[in-house]
Image (tube, rainbow, N blue to C red):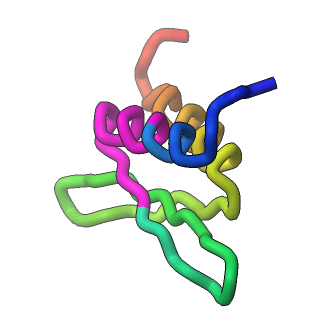
């Protein structure tokens, strides 16, 4: 079980995202916040998905950062 505060999870996700060519934005929807994750590419930004909690965001960024690209050894 994670013992990080919500802000610490967001900060960790932001660090990891930046290190792997990703970024996210926060979108307020009523009283909730959605986190939209994008990958920076030469041709533009690619939307990868959204999450509604800092914990979900951190997990999603972690998975997106470790995706193997085509041709990489297993």
Q: Position of residue 65 (x, y in %)?
A: 47, 33
Residue 58 sits in quarter? top right
Q: Quadrant of the N terminus?
A: top right
Residue placed farthest to the right in the image? 1
Q: How many marks?
A: 0
Residue 32 sits in quarter? bottom right
Residue placed farthest to the bottom in the image? 30
Horizontal side, residue 31 vs residue 22: left or right? right
Residue at position x 52%, y 38% in the image: 8
- 28 or 49: nearer the viewer: 28
Q: Position of residue 57 (x, y in %)?
A: 60, 49
Residue at position x 18%, y 55% in the image: 42
Chief SS of the magenta region: helix
- 26 or 72: nearer the viewer: 26
Q: Position of residue 51 (x, y in %)?
A: 66, 60
* Residue 21 sits above or below residue 67 on the image: below
Residue range in magenta is: 12-24
Q: Quadrant of the C terminus?
A: top right
Horizontal side, residue 33 vs residue 19: left or right? right
């Amino acid at each position: 079980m994670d013992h990080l505060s919500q802000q610490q999870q967001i900060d960790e996700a932001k660090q990891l995202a930046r290190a792997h060519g990703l970024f996210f934005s926060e979108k307020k929807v009523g009283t909730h916040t959605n986190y939209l994750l994008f990958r920076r590419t030469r041709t533009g930004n690619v939307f990868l998905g959204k999450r509604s909690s800092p914990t979900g965001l951190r997990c999603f960024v972690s998975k997106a950062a470790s995706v193997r690209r085509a041709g990489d050894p297993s």
